[in-house]
Image (spheres, rainbow, N blue to C red):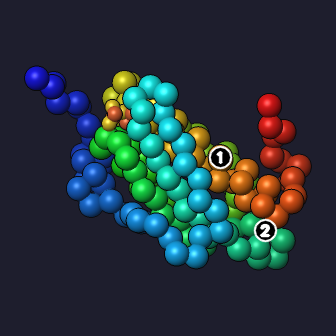
Amino acid sequence: TRIPLPYSPKVLEIFRNPKNLGPLENATVVESAGSPACGDMIKLYLRIERIDNIDVIKEATFESYGCAANIAAASIVTEMIKGKDLRYAWNITWKQISDELGGLPPIKYHCSILAVGALKRAIRAYYKKIGEHPEWLPKEL
Ligand code: FES
Ligand code: FES
């Protein structure tokens, strides 16, 4: 038997009615990240446009293969980055995502870390694709 997790109302609301769910036809980058903790996955689709020399996320959608926290974290991150520039998006933390969700149970922190991981991969993939490396983007280890 499974013990129900103490999910916040916000997590449950998004789980039942996720925003920005599904593939994005004209995505600039598509990247996924998997969690070593549970084998779950998040796939992020971003449409990025350069406006006045700033790379802006015009659209963001996701697909999730995982638990309620995974879906909620992926959905809220697409809302948090829409209309924002890549530098801002790069600096979003798993804690900010968790806070936006009204707090995740500690054993679900990694779901939020997974969402950040997918976002960082997508940002790196974008700069690889266009062959640039902005000064704020840390060198890959
Ligand atoms: Fe795998 Fe969350 S533990 S679905
Ligand atoms: Fe692993 Fe949610 S992503 S339990």
In this rendering, the answer to whether 54 lies above or below 42 is: below
**Secondary structure at numbered mark 1:** helix
Q: Amino acid at mark 1?
A: Lys
Q: Are marks 1 and 2 in contact (CB under 8 Å)?
A: no
Give the percent coordinates (x, y) of residue 135.
89, 49
Name the residue beneath numbered marker 2.
54
Label 1: few (<14), some or many (≥20) within 10 Å?
Answer: many
Secondary structure under tag 2 reads strand
> Measured along the vertical axis of the image, is residue 60 above or below residue 111?
below
Residue drawn at x 30%, y 43% is: 68
Label number found at residue 120: 1
Position of 131 relative to 141 (above/below): below
- 129 and 11: which one is in front? 129
Point 16% across, 24% down: residue: 3
Q: Is residue 95 visible?
A: no
**Can residue 117 be seen from the camera position used here?**
yes
Residue 63 coordinates in the image, percent (x, y)? 42, 56
The spot of residue 57 in percent (x, y) is 63, 67
Q: Residue at x 44, y 51 (%)?
A: 74
- On screen, residue 43 versus residue 87, left or right, reads left
Amino acid tagged 2:
Ile
Which quadrant of the figure contains the C terminus? top right
- Asked where in the image residue 83 lies, by quadrant, the reply is bottom right
Horizontal arrangement in the rendering, residue 20 relative to residue 17 (left or right): right
Q: Earlier in the sequence, mark 1 or mark 2?
A: 2
